[in-house]
Protein backbone atom coordinates (compact mmCIF):
# COMPACT_ATOMS: atom_id res chain seq x y z
CA UNK A 1 0.00 0.00 0.00
CA UNK A 2 1.40 3.44 -0.91
CA UNK A 3 1.52 6.25 1.63
CA UNK A 4 1.64 10.05 1.65
CA UNK A 5 4.06 11.87 3.93
CA UNK A 6 2.81 14.86 5.86
CA UNK A 7 5.31 17.28 7.33
CA UNK A 8 3.66 19.18 10.19
CA UNK A 9 5.53 21.39 12.63
CA UNK A 10 8.80 19.66 11.80
CA UNK A 11 7.47 16.11 12.29
CA UNK A 12 6.73 13.57 9.54
CA UNK A 13 3.59 11.42 9.47
CA UNK A 14 2.78 8.57 7.08
CA UNK A 15 -0.82 8.47 5.84
CA UNK A 16 -2.26 5.57 3.79
CA UNK A 17 -3.26 6.29 0.19
CA UNK A 18 -6.38 4.70 -1.31
CA UNK A 19 -6.89 4.07 -5.02
CA UNK A 20 -10.36 3.82 -6.56
CA UNK A 21 -11.23 1.37 -9.33
CA UNK A 22 -10.90 4.19 -11.93
CA UNK A 23 -7.52 5.28 -10.55
CA UNK A 24 -8.76 8.09 -8.28
CA UNK A 25 -6.28 8.83 -5.53
CA UNK A 26 -7.31 9.67 -1.96
CA UNK A 27 -5.19 10.30 1.13
CA UNK A 28 -6.81 8.45 3.99
CA UNK A 29 -6.80 10.89 6.90
CA UNK A 30 -8.96 8.90 9.32
CA UNK A 31 -6.02 8.68 11.74
CA UNK A 32 -4.89 12.30 11.23
CA UNK A 33 -6.32 13.86 14.37
CA UNK A 34 -5.34 10.97 16.61
CA UNK A 35 -1.76 11.06 15.26
CA UNK A 36 -1.22 14.82 14.94
CA UNK A 37 -3.99 16.65 16.83
CA UNK A 38 -4.76 18.55 13.59
CA UNK A 39 -7.89 18.48 11.44
CA UNK A 40 -8.25 19.32 7.74
CA UNK A 41 -10.00 22.50 6.58
CA UNK A 42 -12.19 22.06 3.49
CA UNK A 43 -15.26 24.33 3.46
CA UNK A 44 -17.82 23.05 0.96
CA UNK A 45 -16.01 19.66 1.01
CA UNK A 46 -14.53 20.25 -2.45
CA UNK A 47 -11.57 17.96 -1.66
CA UNK A 48 -13.15 15.57 0.81
CA UNK A 49 -14.04 11.97 -0.02
CA UNK A 50 -16.77 11.25 2.54
CA UNK A 51 -17.19 7.56 1.69
CA UNK A 52 -16.11 4.74 -0.61
CA UNK A 53 -18.96 4.00 -3.00
CA UNK A 54 -19.52 1.48 -5.80
CA UNK A 55 -22.59 3.18 -7.29
CA UNK A 56 -21.71 6.09 -9.57
CA UNK A 57 -18.51 7.21 -11.26
CA UNK A 58 -17.94 10.76 -12.51
CA UNK A 59 -14.88 12.15 -14.27
CA UNK A 60 -15.59 15.87 -14.30
CA UNK A 61 -12.68 16.74 -16.58
CA UNK A 62 -13.71 14.26 -19.27
CA UNK A 63 -17.49 14.64 -18.83
CA UNK A 64 -17.98 10.98 -17.89
CA UNK A 65 -20.96 9.73 -15.86
CA UNK A 66 -21.59 6.03 -15.25
CA UNK A 67 -24.11 4.21 -13.06
CA UNK A 68 -22.68 0.91 -11.79
CA UNK A 69 -20.21 1.01 -14.69
CA UNK A 70 -22.75 1.72 -17.47
CA UNK A 71 -22.25 4.99 -19.43
CA UNK A 72 -25.13 7.43 -19.01
CA UNK A 73 -25.41 7.80 -22.81
CA UNK A 74 -26.21 4.07 -23.21
CA UNK A 75 -28.68 3.99 -20.35
CA UNK A 76 -30.38 7.13 -21.67
CA UNK A 77 -30.73 5.50 -25.10
CA UNK A 78 -31.87 2.01 -24.21
CA UNK A 79 -33.03 1.63 -20.59
CA UNK A 80 -36.23 2.50 -18.77
CA UNK A 81 -36.27 4.43 -15.52
CA UNK A 82 -37.49 1.37 -13.61
CA UNK A 83 -34.54 -0.68 -14.93
CA UNK A 84 -32.18 2.09 -13.81
CA UNK A 85 -33.84 2.11 -10.35
CA UNK A 86 -33.16 -1.62 -10.10
CA UNK A 87 -29.60 -1.19 -11.36
CA UNK A 88 -28.72 1.53 -8.86
CA UNK A 89 -30.33 -0.17 -5.87
CA UNK A 90 -29.33 -3.79 -6.60
CA UNK A 91 -26.05 -3.28 -8.49
CA UNK A 92 -26.96 -5.08 -11.74
CA UNK A 93 -29.41 -4.73 -14.60
CA UNK A 94 -32.45 -6.92 -13.86
CA UNK A 95 -33.18 -10.16 -15.71
CA UNK A 96 -36.67 -10.31 -17.25
CA UNK A 97 -38.17 -12.22 -14.25
CA UNK A 98 -36.44 -9.82 -11.82
CA UNK A 99 -37.80 -6.83 -13.71
CA UNK A 100 -41.31 -8.30 -13.81
CA UNK A 101 -41.24 -8.94 -10.06
CA UNK A 102 -39.89 -5.43 -9.39
CA UNK A 103 -42.57 -3.81 -11.57
CA UNK A 104 -45.25 -5.90 -9.90
CA UNK A 105 -44.15 -4.73 -6.46
CA UNK A 106 -43.99 -1.09 -7.59
CA UNK A 107 -47.54 -1.41 -8.93
CA UNK A 108 -48.89 -3.05 -5.76
CA UNK A 109 -47.49 -0.37 -3.45
CA UNK A 110 -48.44 2.78 -5.33
CA UNK A 111 -51.46 3.77 -3.23
CA UNK A 112 -50.93 5.96 -0.18
CA UNK A 113 -52.84 5.31 3.05
CA UNK A 114 -56.25 6.98 2.68
CA UNK A 115 -55.69 8.96 5.91
CA UNK A 116 -52.68 10.63 4.30
CA UNK A 117 -54.99 12.31 1.78
CA UNK A 118 -56.17 14.51 4.64
CA UNK A 119 -52.66 15.92 5.01
CA UNK A 120 -53.02 17.67 1.66
CA UNK A 121 -55.98 19.63 3.08
CA UNK A 122 -53.69 21.32 5.59
CA UNK A 123 -51.46 22.99 3.01
CA UNK A 124 -52.39 26.39 1.55
CA UNK A 125 -53.02 26.32 -2.25
CA UNK A 126 -49.87 28.42 -2.70
CA UNK A 127 -47.65 25.82 -0.98
CA UNK A 128 -44.57 24.92 -2.97
CA UNK A 129 -44.84 21.25 -4.05
CA UNK A 130 -41.34 20.58 -2.64
CA UNK A 131 -42.61 21.59 0.84
CA UNK A 132 -45.49 19.14 0.43
CA UNK A 133 -43.28 16.36 -0.97
CA UNK A 134 -40.69 16.55 1.83
CA UNK A 135 -43.38 16.65 4.54
CA UNK A 136 -45.34 13.75 3.03
CA UNK A 137 -42.24 11.58 2.54
CA UNK A 138 -41.18 12.14 6.18
CA UNK A 139 -44.78 11.30 7.18
CA UNK A 140 -44.56 7.88 5.51
CA UNK A 141 -42.47 6.82 8.53
CA UNK A 142 -45.58 7.30 10.67
CA UNK A 143 -47.35 4.59 8.65
CA UNK A 144 -44.63 2.08 7.83
CA UNK A 145 -42.42 0.71 10.60
CA UNK A 146 -38.67 0.65 10.18
CA UNK A 147 -38.14 -3.09 10.34
CA UNK A 148 -38.46 -3.95 6.64
CA UNK A 149 -36.10 -1.76 4.63
CA UNK A 150 -36.53 -3.77 1.40
CA UNK A 151 -40.29 -3.24 1.42
CA UNK A 152 -39.95 0.38 2.50
CA UNK A 153 -37.66 1.02 -0.48
CA UNK A 154 -40.42 -0.23 -2.81
CA UNK A 155 -43.05 1.75 -0.93
CA UNK A 156 -41.00 4.92 -1.15
CA UNK A 157 -40.24 4.57 -4.87
CA UNK A 158 -43.82 3.84 -5.70
CA UNK A 159 -45.67 6.22 -3.38
CA UNK A 160 -43.46 9.24 -4.08
CA UNK A 161 -44.90 9.61 -7.59
CA UNK A 162 -48.46 9.31 -6.21
CA UNK A 163 -47.72 11.98 -3.59
CA UNK A 164 -46.14 14.25 -6.22
CA UNK A 165 -49.14 13.94 -8.56
CA UNK A 166 -51.65 14.40 -5.71
CA UNK A 167 -49.87 17.59 -4.60
CA UNK A 168 -50.29 18.97 -8.12
CA UNK A 169 -53.97 18.01 -8.26
CA UNK A 170 -54.52 19.69 -4.88
CA UNK A 171 -52.81 22.88 -6.08
CA UNK A 172 -55.17 23.19 -9.07
CA UNK A 173 -58.27 22.17 -7.11
CA UNK A 174 -58.91 18.93 -9.02
CA UNK A 175 -59.80 15.56 -7.46
CA UNK A 176 -57.00 13.09 -6.91
CA UNK A 177 -56.59 10.49 -9.66
CA UNK A 178 -55.67 7.04 -8.40
CA UNK A 179 -52.92 4.93 -10.01
CA UNK A 180 -53.93 2.22 -12.47
CA UNK A 181 -52.41 -1.24 -12.27
CA UNK A 182 -52.28 -1.67 -16.05
CA UNK A 183 -49.94 1.31 -16.52
CA UNK A 184 -46.16 1.45 -16.19
CA UNK A 185 -44.40 3.54 -13.53
CA UNK A 186 -43.92 6.55 -15.81
CA UNK A 187 -47.32 6.24 -17.53
CA UNK A 188 -48.97 6.08 -14.12
CA UNK A 189 -47.31 9.27 -12.98
CA UNK A 190 -48.51 11.19 -16.06
CA UNK A 191 -51.98 9.62 -15.71
CA UNK A 192 -52.27 10.76 -12.07
CA UNK A 193 -51.03 14.24 -13.02
CA UNK A 194 -53.22 14.91 -16.04
CA UNK A 195 -56.27 12.62 -16.15
CA UNK A 196 -59.59 14.04 -14.95
CA UNK A 197 -62.53 11.86 -13.82
CA UNK A 198 -64.64 12.71 -16.87
CA UNK A 199 -61.97 11.68 -19.34
CA UNK A 200 -58.74 9.73 -19.24
CA UNK A 201 -55.34 10.87 -20.36
CA UNK A 202 -53.40 9.12 -23.07
CA UNK A 203 -49.69 9.03 -22.36
CA UNK A 204 -48.12 9.17 -25.81
CA UNK A 205 -44.97 7.17 -26.58
CA UNK A 206 -43.05 10.45 -27.08
CA UNK A 207 -43.99 11.74 -23.63
CA UNK A 208 -43.27 8.39 -22.00
CA UNK A 209 -39.82 8.23 -23.60
CA UNK A 210 -39.03 11.84 -22.67
CA UNK A 211 -40.03 11.23 -19.04
CA UNK A 212 -37.93 8.06 -18.85
CA UNK A 213 -34.98 9.97 -20.29
CA UNK A 214 -35.27 12.86 -17.81
CA UNK A 215 -35.66 10.58 -14.79
CA UNK A 216 -32.71 8.39 -15.87
CA UNK A 217 -30.45 11.44 -16.27
CA UNK A 218 -31.32 12.57 -12.74
CA UNK A 219 -31.12 9.14 -11.11
CA UNK A 220 -27.78 9.47 -9.31
CA UNK A 221 -24.80 11.79 -9.13
CA UNK A 222 -22.53 10.42 -6.39
CA UNK A 223 -21.88 12.63 -3.34
CA UNK A 224 -23.74 15.81 -4.32
CA UNK A 225 -25.38 18.10 -1.74
CA UNK A 226 -28.70 16.21 -1.39
CA UNK A 227 -27.12 12.73 -1.47
CA UNK A 228 -24.57 13.75 1.15
CA UNK A 229 -27.51 15.05 3.20
CA UNK A 230 -29.27 11.69 2.91
CA UNK A 231 -26.09 9.94 4.07
CA UNK A 232 -25.50 12.51 6.81
CA UNK A 233 -29.00 12.14 8.25
CA UNK A 234 -29.01 8.36 7.76
CA UNK A 235 -25.66 8.01 9.53
CA UNK A 236 -27.37 8.88 12.82
CA UNK A 237 -29.62 5.84 12.36
CA UNK A 238 -32.60 7.92 11.13
CA UNK A 239 -35.03 5.84 9.07
CA UNK A 240 -35.18 5.72 5.26
CA UNK A 241 -38.15 8.09 4.90
CA UNK A 242 -36.66 10.71 7.26
CA UNK A 243 -33.28 10.54 5.50
CA UNK A 244 -34.80 10.93 2.02
CA UNK A 245 -37.06 13.74 3.19
CA UNK A 246 -33.94 15.61 4.31
CA UNK A 247 -32.39 15.00 0.87
CA UNK A 248 -35.50 16.47 -0.78
CA UNK A 249 -35.09 19.64 1.31
CA UNK A 250 -31.41 19.90 0.30
CA UNK A 251 -32.33 19.43 -3.37
CA UNK A 252 -34.86 22.27 -3.19
CA UNK A 253 -32.18 25.00 -2.96
CA UNK A 254 -31.62 27.11 -6.11
CA UNK A 255 -27.91 26.20 -6.24
CA UNK A 256 -28.87 22.52 -6.51
CA UNK A 257 -32.07 20.97 -7.93
CA UNK A 258 -34.06 24.19 -7.48
CA UNK A 259 -32.04 25.62 -10.37
CA UNK A 260 -34.31 23.99 -12.98
CA UNK A 261 -37.25 26.18 -11.91
CA UNK A 262 -34.97 29.23 -11.77
CA UNK A 263 -33.64 28.60 -15.29
CA UNK A 264 -37.10 28.82 -16.84
CA UNK A 265 -37.95 31.88 -14.74
CA UNK A 266 -34.68 33.48 -15.91
CA UNK A 267 -35.39 32.68 -19.58
CA UNK A 268 -38.90 34.12 -19.21
CA UNK A 269 -37.46 37.21 -17.55
CA UNK A 270 -35.04 37.68 -20.47
CA UNK A 271 -37.84 37.46 -23.03
CA UNK A 272 -40.23 39.69 -21.09
CA UNK A 273 -37.57 42.33 -20.34
CA UNK A 274 -37.02 43.04 -24.03
CA UNK A 275 -33.29 43.19 -23.22
CA UNK A 276 -30.73 41.05 -25.01
CA UNK A 277 -29.37 37.77 -23.65
CA UNK A 278 -25.96 39.47 -23.71
CA UNK A 279 -27.16 42.04 -21.12
CA UNK A 280 -27.99 39.18 -18.75
CA UNK A 281 -24.64 37.47 -19.38
CA UNK A 282 -22.92 40.77 -18.54
CA UNK A 283 -24.96 41.07 -15.36
CA UNK A 284 -24.03 37.53 -14.30
CA UNK A 285 -20.37 38.58 -14.46
CA UNK A 286 -20.90 41.41 -11.97
CA UNK A 287 -20.43 39.86 -8.53
CA UNK A 288 -22.44 42.59 -6.79
CA UNK A 289 -25.46 42.18 -9.11
CA UNK A 290 -26.70 39.18 -7.12
CA UNK A 291 -27.50 37.53 -10.48
CA UNK A 292 -26.01 34.30 -11.74
CA UNK A 293 -26.65 32.38 -14.94
CA UNK A 294 -28.85 29.67 -13.51
CA UNK A 295 -28.17 26.26 -15.01
CA UNK A 296 -24.51 27.18 -15.53
CA UNK A 297 -21.50 25.90 -13.60
CA UNK A 298 -20.84 22.75 -11.64
CA UNK A 299 -18.57 21.74 -8.78
CA UNK A 300 -17.36 18.60 -10.57
CA UNK A 301 -17.86 19.06 -14.34
CA UNK A 302 -15.16 21.32 -15.76
CA UNK A 303 -15.55 20.56 -19.45
CA UNK A 304 -19.16 19.60 -20.10
CA UNK A 305 -22.03 17.98 -18.22
CA UNK A 306 -22.91 14.87 -20.26
CA UNK A 307 -26.51 15.08 -19.03
CA UNK A 308 -26.86 18.60 -20.47
CA UNK A 309 -25.41 17.40 -23.80
CA UNK A 310 -28.01 14.61 -24.01
CA UNK A 311 -30.85 16.94 -23.01
CA UNK A 312 -29.88 19.65 -25.49
CA UNK A 313 -30.01 17.09 -28.31
CA UNK A 314 -33.28 15.65 -26.97
CA UNK A 315 -34.98 19.06 -26.65
CA UNK A 316 -35.40 19.52 -30.42
CA UNK A 317 -36.50 15.91 -30.96
CA UNK A 318 -38.99 15.92 -28.09
CA UNK A 319 -40.50 19.26 -29.09
CA UNK A 320 -41.00 18.15 -32.67
CA UNK A 321 -42.36 14.72 -31.60
CA UNK A 322 -44.87 16.54 -29.40
CA UNK A 323 -45.61 19.04 -32.15
CA UNK A 324 -44.56 21.97 -29.93
CA UNK A 325 -42.44 25.06 -30.38
CA UNK A 326 -40.98 26.86 -27.40
CA UNK A 327 -39.44 30.33 -27.83
CA UNK A 328 -37.54 29.74 -24.58
CA UNK A 329 -35.44 27.09 -26.35
CA UNK A 330 -34.17 29.74 -28.73
CA UNK A 331 -33.39 32.09 -25.81
CA UNK A 332 -31.57 29.26 -24.01
CA UNK A 333 -29.49 28.41 -27.09
CA UNK A 334 -28.60 32.08 -27.60
CA UNK A 335 -27.65 32.53 -23.94
CA UNK A 336 -25.48 29.40 -24.05
CA UNK A 337 -23.66 30.54 -27.19
CA UNK A 338 -22.89 33.98 -25.73
CA UNK A 339 -21.71 32.58 -22.38
CA UNK A 340 -19.57 29.84 -23.93
CA UNK A 341 -17.62 32.36 -25.99
CA UNK A 342 -17.15 34.81 -23.09
CA UNK A 343 -13.70 34.79 -21.38
CA UNK A 344 -15.35 35.00 -17.90
CA UNK A 345 -17.15 31.69 -18.44
CA UNK A 346 -14.26 30.09 -20.37
CA UNK A 347 -11.67 30.89 -17.66
CA UNK A 348 -13.92 29.58 -14.89
CA UNK A 349 -14.91 26.50 -16.93
CA UNK A 350 -18.62 27.25 -16.58
CA UNK A 351 -20.86 25.16 -18.84
CA UNK A 352 -24.58 24.39 -18.94
CA UNK A 353 -25.50 21.79 -16.34
CA UNK A 354 -28.40 19.30 -16.31
CA UNK A 355 -30.84 21.97 -15.16
CA UNK A 356 -30.26 24.25 -18.16
CA UNK A 357 -32.32 22.30 -20.69
CA UNK A 358 -34.47 20.00 -18.52
CA UNK A 359 -37.14 22.68 -17.93
CA UNK A 360 -37.73 23.09 -21.68
CA UNK A 361 -38.63 19.39 -21.88
CA UNK A 362 -40.79 19.46 -18.74
CA UNK A 363 -42.69 22.44 -20.13
CA UNK A 364 -43.29 20.63 -23.41
CA UNK A 365 -44.75 17.72 -21.43
CA UNK A 366 -47.16 20.05 -19.62
CA UNK A 367 -45.40 19.94 -16.24
CA UNK A 368 -45.85 23.29 -14.44
CA UNK A 369 -42.70 25.24 -13.54
CA UNK A 370 -43.05 24.88 -9.77
CA UNK A 371 -43.12 21.07 -10.17
CA UNK A 372 -39.73 20.91 -11.94
CA UNK A 373 -37.73 20.29 -8.77
CA UNK A 374 -40.25 17.63 -7.72
CA UNK A 375 -39.52 15.91 -11.04
CA UNK A 376 -35.81 16.06 -10.22
CA UNK A 377 -36.55 14.53 -6.79
CA UNK A 378 -38.55 11.67 -8.37
CA UNK A 379 -35.61 10.98 -10.66
CA UNK A 380 -33.00 11.20 -7.90
CA UNK A 381 -34.96 8.87 -5.58
CA UNK A 382 -33.26 5.59 -6.64
CA UNK A 383 -29.84 7.23 -6.24
CA UNK A 384 -30.62 8.48 -2.74
CA UNK A 385 -32.02 5.05 -1.84
CA UNK A 386 -29.00 3.18 -3.25
CA UNK A 387 -26.60 5.49 -1.40
CA UNK A 388 -28.57 5.19 1.86
CA UNK A 389 -28.63 1.39 1.53
CA UNK A 390 -24.91 1.23 0.75
CA UNK A 391 -24.22 3.31 3.87
CA UNK A 392 -26.49 1.22 6.12
CA UNK A 393 -25.01 -2.06 4.81
CA UNK A 394 -21.42 -0.86 5.35
CA UNK A 395 -20.20 -1.91 8.79
CA UNK A 396 -17.54 0.83 8.65
CA UNK A 397 -20.20 3.57 8.66
CA UNK A 398 -19.83 5.99 11.57
CA UNK A 399 -22.09 8.87 12.48
CA UNK A 400 -21.14 11.79 10.19
CA UNK A 401 -19.67 14.46 12.37
CA UNK A 402 -17.20 16.92 10.83
CA UNK A 403 -14.83 19.04 12.92
CA UNK A 404 -14.37 22.80 12.68
CA UNK A 405 -11.75 25.45 13.20
CA UNK A 406 -13.07 27.66 15.98
CA UNK A 407 -12.46 31.38 15.32
CA UNK A 408 -14.71 32.93 18.01
CA UNK A 409 -13.88 34.67 21.29
CA UNK A 410 -11.41 33.18 23.70
CA UNK A 411 -12.73 32.46 27.18
CA UNK A 412 -14.45 35.48 28.76
CA UNK A 413 -15.81 36.24 32.24
CA UNK A 414 -19.56 36.70 32.59
CA UNK A 415 -18.82 39.04 35.51
CA UNK A 416 -17.33 41.52 32.97
CA UNK A 417 -20.78 41.75 31.36
CA UNK A 418 -22.35 42.35 34.81
CA UNK A 419 -19.94 45.22 35.43
CA UNK A 420 -20.64 46.76 32.02
CA UNK A 421 -24.38 46.39 32.62
CA UNK A 422 -24.10 47.92 36.09
CA UNK A 423 -22.30 50.92 34.57
CA UNK A 424 -24.98 51.31 31.89
CA UNK A 425 -27.78 51.22 34.47
CA UNK A 426 -25.94 53.68 36.72
N1 LIG B 1 -22.98 32.52 -13.17
C1 LIG B 1 -21.96 33.40 -12.99
N2 LIG B 1 -20.80 33.10 -12.33
C2 LIG B 1 -20.68 31.86 -11.84
C3 LIG B 1 -21.70 30.88 -11.99
C4 LIG B 1 -22.88 31.25 -12.69
N3 LIG B 1 -23.87 30.37 -12.86
N4 LIG B 1 -21.31 29.74 -11.39
C5 LIG B 1 -20.08 29.97 -10.88
N5 LIG B 1 -19.71 31.25 -11.15
C6 LIG B 1 -18.40 31.86 -10.81
C7 LIG B 1 -18.28 32.12 -9.33
O1 LIG B 1 -18.75 33.39 -8.99
C8 LIG B 1 -16.79 31.96 -9.12
O2 LIG B 1 -16.17 33.13 -9.60
P1 LIG B 1 -14.78 33.65 -8.92
O3 LIG B 1 -13.77 32.57 -9.17
O4 LIG B 1 -14.48 34.93 -9.64
O5 LIG B 1 -15.08 33.85 -7.47
C9 LIG B 1 -16.41 30.83 -10.08
O6 LIG B 1 -17.39 30.90 -11.12
C10 LIG B 1 -16.41 29.45 -9.42
O7 LIG B 1 -17.71 29.20 -8.93
P2 LIG B 1 -18.04 28.66 -7.46
O8 LIG B 1 -19.31 29.31 -6.99
O9 LIG B 1 -16.84 28.78 -6.57
O10 LIG B 1 -18.29 27.15 -7.78
P3 LIG B 1 -18.97 26.07 -6.84
O11 LIG B 1 -18.43 24.77 -7.26
O12 LIG B 1 -18.83 26.47 -5.42
O13 LIG B 1 -20.54 26.18 -7.22
C11 LIG B 1 -22.54 25.95 -8.46
C12 LIG B 1 -21.12 25.41 -8.20
C13 LIG B 1 -23.30 26.08 -7.15
C14 LIG B 1 -23.28 24.97 -9.36
C15 LIG B 1 -22.44 27.33 -9.17
O14 LIG B 1 -21.80 27.19 -10.41
C16 LIG B 1 -23.79 27.99 -9.35
O15 LIG B 1 -24.27 28.68 -8.43
N6 LIG B 1 -24.47 27.79 -10.53
C17 LIG B 1 -25.81 28.33 -10.75
C18 LIG B 1 -26.85 27.46 -10.05
C19 LIG B 1 -27.05 26.13 -10.74
O16 LIG B 1 -27.21 26.03 -11.94
N7 LIG B 1 -27.10 25.06 -9.93
C20 LIG B 1 -27.34 23.70 -10.41
C21 LIG B 1 -26.08 22.90 -10.32
S1 LIG B 1 -26.33 21.28 -10.99
C22 LIG B 1 -27.19 20.47 -9.81
O17 LIG B 1 -27.08 20.69 -8.64
C23 LIG B 1 -28.14 19.54 -10.25
Image (cartoon, rainbow, N blue to C red):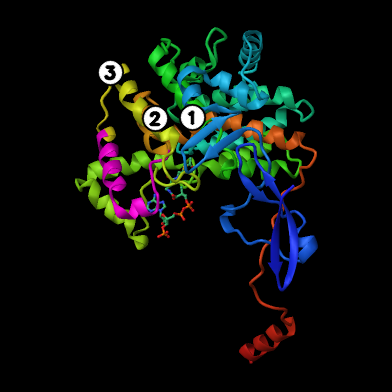
First reached walking from the N terminus: tag 2 or tag 3: 2
Ligand 1 within 8 Å of the CB at mark 1? no
- Circle 1 residue: 217
Residue ID at (68%, 35%): 388
**Dot 2: within a 10 Å radius of its alpha carbon, few (fewer than 14), some, or many (20 or more) residues?**
many
Q: Is residue 236 above or below residue 287?
A: above
Q: Secondary structure at mark 1?
A: helix
Residue 311 at x, y = what percent? Answer: 39, 30
Ligand 1 within 8 Å of the CB at mark 3? no
Q: Is residue 344 magenta?
A: yes
- Circle 3 residue: 323
Q: CA distance from mark 1 to mark 3?
A: 23 Å
Q: Is residue 15 above or below residue 81?
A: below
Front residue of this view, candidates 307 and 177 = 307
Residue ID at (70%, 32%): 389
Total marks shown come to 3
Ligand 1 within 8 Å of the CB at mark 2? no
Residue 311, label in figure: 2
Q: CA distance from mark 1 to mark 2?
A: 9 Å
Residue 4 at x, y = what percent? Answer: 69, 56
Residue 120 at x, y = what percent? Answer: 55, 31
The magenta span reads 330-353
Which of the 4 image quarters holds residue 421?
bottom right
Residue 385 in sight = yes
Q: CA distance from mark 2 to mark 3?
A: 17 Å
Q: Is residue 296 magenta?
A: no
First reached walking from the N terminus: tag 1 or tag 2: 1
Q: Are marks 1 and 2 in contact (CB under 8 Å)?
A: yes
Front residue of this view, candidates 417 and 104 = 104
Viewer-side label of 1, 3? 1
Amino acid sequence: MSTATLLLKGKEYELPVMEGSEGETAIDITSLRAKTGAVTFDPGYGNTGSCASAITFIDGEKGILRYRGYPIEELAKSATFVEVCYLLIHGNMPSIPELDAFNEKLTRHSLIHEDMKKFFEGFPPSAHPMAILSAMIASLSAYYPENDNELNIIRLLSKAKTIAAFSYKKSIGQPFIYPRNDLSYTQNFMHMMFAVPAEGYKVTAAIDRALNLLLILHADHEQNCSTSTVRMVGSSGANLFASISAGICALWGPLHGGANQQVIEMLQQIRESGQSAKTFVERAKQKDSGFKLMGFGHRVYKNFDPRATILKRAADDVLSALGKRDPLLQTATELEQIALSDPYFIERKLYPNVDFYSGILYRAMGIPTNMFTVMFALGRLPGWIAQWKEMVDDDKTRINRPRQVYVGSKVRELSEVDEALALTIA
